[in-house]
Structures are given as structure tokens and as C-alpha cells.
Image: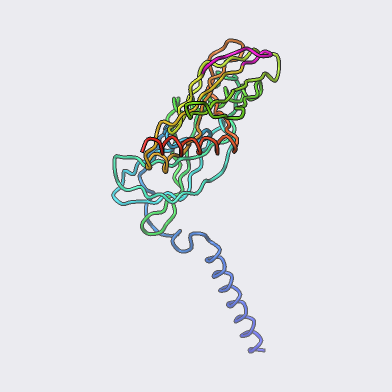
């Protein structure tokens, strides 16, 4: 029966070896995860970079205080103030420096226990960081608290939620004016009993928006808008992150103005691009 025991032992060794190999391949870090490098010395802050961000984003600025570069491959914002979105993938090298590198990170719907007066709860970021030995470290960093940046984002998000529940904001069809600019009508219509008004309309990096005649309408308001081009250089046009990042300031029942992004339908965008081509061609 000795040969039977040999076969059984051999099969056990083969199965055990196969399982170990499969486990190694299944691990996203493989042998690198067992490397002996220390976690990198990092700090993080929450920042606003308005030119590069759209609503629902915050810049997590990471500074590397160590001696070697690291690569951030994932970021997770952890706080009760925003609905969790999990780990967001990155591939950003952060060299040793006093200068931070930004990770433009999305956040979820805001929690607004005190309405538009809500403030941010304590928050941290969990960074997935690869070091030079290919090890991936999980580094959790507490953000400062109280945090003015997150307070502002919570306040803005809660105010935007309040406006969305109270108003329908629409940009009507754009038509050409005699001077080659475009004109359209902004309508702010109440969805309930609140009285609405518009205090300001602001353009983007490429387009100027001027507010003209304003008229009350059914508890809301309509505003005549004119659009013109403010930048024609190729760098500005080609690199514009939010060419249609228009903003409307709306008041509810006479309260403080709330900044709300203006949605621009596809046909309005096409009209604006067409105007840009013509107006910039005239300036050459």
C-alpha cells in the first residue's frame, strides 16, 4: 500500500501548490504586497480649483514628505456629509516636494440636516499608494476639522438641492442678434409656492453672458440674456474644461442668492460654438 500513500501525498502537494499559485495570481498586489517598505509620509488637504472642477468635485491635494516618489492609484473620500462613492481610480505620481499634487475627486449627494445652514462633518481620505518596490499601501489621512472647503461645498450642495426642489430653470432657444451675438430667455419657474428671483448670471471662460430685461412671471422670473465670445485664442478654446459653465444666482423667498449651474441643451451649445467660429473669424 506504500504506492497508494505516495500517490495520495503527491496529489495533496500538487493541489496545495496549485491553490497557492492561484491565490498569488488572484491577489491584485501579488508578492509586491508583502514588500517591507514603510508607508509613505503623506499629508492631504481639501481644496477648490474652480477652473478645473465641475459641481460635485473637490481637489484632494496630496503632499509627499518622503525621499522617493510615490504613485496614487486610488482615492476614497470618507465622511457622513456626502454619500459614499467608493474608491476612485487615479494614476498620479507625487514626487517628494513641498508642492501638492491635486486629485480631482467626486463626492456624492450632500447630507443636509440643517438645510442650507448645514456644515461638514469630520472627513478623511483613504489613499491607495504604490511605492518604488511595487507595494501598495492604504494610507488614511484625516482632513482638518472644522474644514472651510468642505463646509462651503456642503453649503453650496444643500442650497442647490433646495433650489432644485423649488424651481425649474431653463434656457430658451438662442437667436442671432443684429451684431452677431446671440440672445435667449432664461426662465425660472416655481415648483411650489416659493417666490423666486434672479440676482446675477455669469458666463464662462469662453462666453460672456449679460443679463438684460427682467420680468416677474407666475411667482418666478424671466430674464433676457445676451451671449458673446470673450476668448478666441486656440489655447483657451482647445483647453476649456467647462466652456458652458454658466451660473445663475437664484433667491428663494427673498433669502440669500444661491449659485446654480445653468444647464445648456445640445442645440444651444451648437449655436454658441457656431457663433464662436464666426466671431473669432472676424477678429483674425
- Give x and y (percent) for residue 263: 58, 31
Q: Which quadrant of the view contains residue 208?
A: top left
Q: Which quarter of the rendering shows the C terminus?
A: top left
The magenta span reads: 212-221
Q: Is residue 53 magenta?
A: no
Q: Residue at x 39, y 37 (%)?
A: 232
| Position above or below: 163 against 13 | above
Task: State the predominant SS element of the stretch in magenta.
Answer: strand
Q: Residue at x 49, y 40 (%)?
A: 105
Nearest the camera: 275 or 167? 275
Q: Residue at x 51, y 42 (%)?
A: 76
Q: Which quarter of the rendering shows the N terminus?
A: bottom right
Nearest the camera: 242 or 212? 212
- Give x and y (percent) for residue 193: 70, 13
Question: Residue lying farthest right?
Answer: 192
| Position above or below: 215 against 13 | above
Please say which color scheme the image uses.
Answer: rainbow
- Give x and y (percent) for residue 75: 48, 44
Question: Residue lying farthest front?
Answer: 178
Amino acid at each position: 500500500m506504500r504506492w497508494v500513500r505516495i500517490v495520495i501525498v503527491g496529489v495533496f502537494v500538487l493541489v496545495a501548490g496549485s491553490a497557492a499559485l492561484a491565490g498569488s495570481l488572484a491577489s491584485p498586489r501579488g508578492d509586491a504586497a508583502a514588500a517591507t517598505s514603510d508607508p509613505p509620509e503623506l499629508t492631504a488637504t481639501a481644496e477648490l480649483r474652480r477652473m478645473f472642477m465641475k459641481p460635485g468635485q473637490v481637489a484632494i491635494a496630496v503632499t509627499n514628505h518622503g525621499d522617493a516618489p510615490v504613485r496614487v492609484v486610488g482615492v476614497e473620500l470618507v465622511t457622513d456629509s456626502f454619500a459614499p462613492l467608493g474608491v476612485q481610480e487615479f494614476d498620479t505620481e507625487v514626487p517628494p516636494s513641498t508642492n501638492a499634487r491635486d486629485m480631482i475627486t467626486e463626492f456624492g449627494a450632500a447630507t443636509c440636516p440643517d438645510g442650507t445652514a448645514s456644515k461638514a462633518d469630520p472627513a478623511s481620505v483613504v489613499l491607495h499608494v504604490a511605492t518604488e518596490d511595487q507595494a501598495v499601501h492604504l494610507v488614511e489621512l484625516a482632513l482638518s476639522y472644522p474644514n472651510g472647503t468642505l463646509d462651503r461645498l456642503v453649503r453650496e450642495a444643500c442650497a442647490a438641492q433646495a433650489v432644485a426642489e423649488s424651481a425649474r430653470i431653463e434656457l430658451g432657444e438662442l437667436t442671432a442678434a443684429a451684431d452677431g451675438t446671440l440672445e435667449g430667455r432664461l426662465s425660472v419657474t416655481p415648483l411650489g409656492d416659493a417666490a423666486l428671483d434672479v440676482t446675477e448670471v455669469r458666463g464662462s471662460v469662453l462666453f460672456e453672458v449679460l443679463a438684460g430685461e427682467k420680468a416677474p412671471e407666475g411667482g418666478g422670473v424671466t430674464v433676457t440674456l445676451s451671449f458673446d465670445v470673450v476668448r478666441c485664442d486656440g489655447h483657451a478654446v482647445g483647453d476649456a474644461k467647462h466652456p458652458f459653465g454658466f451660473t445663475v444666482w437664484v433667491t428663494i423667498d427673498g433669502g440669500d442668492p444661491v449659485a446654480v449651474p445653468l444647464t445648456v441643451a445640445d442645440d444651444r451649445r451648437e449655436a454658441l460654438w457656431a457663433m464662436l467660429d464666426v466671431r473669432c473669424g472676424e477678429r483674425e
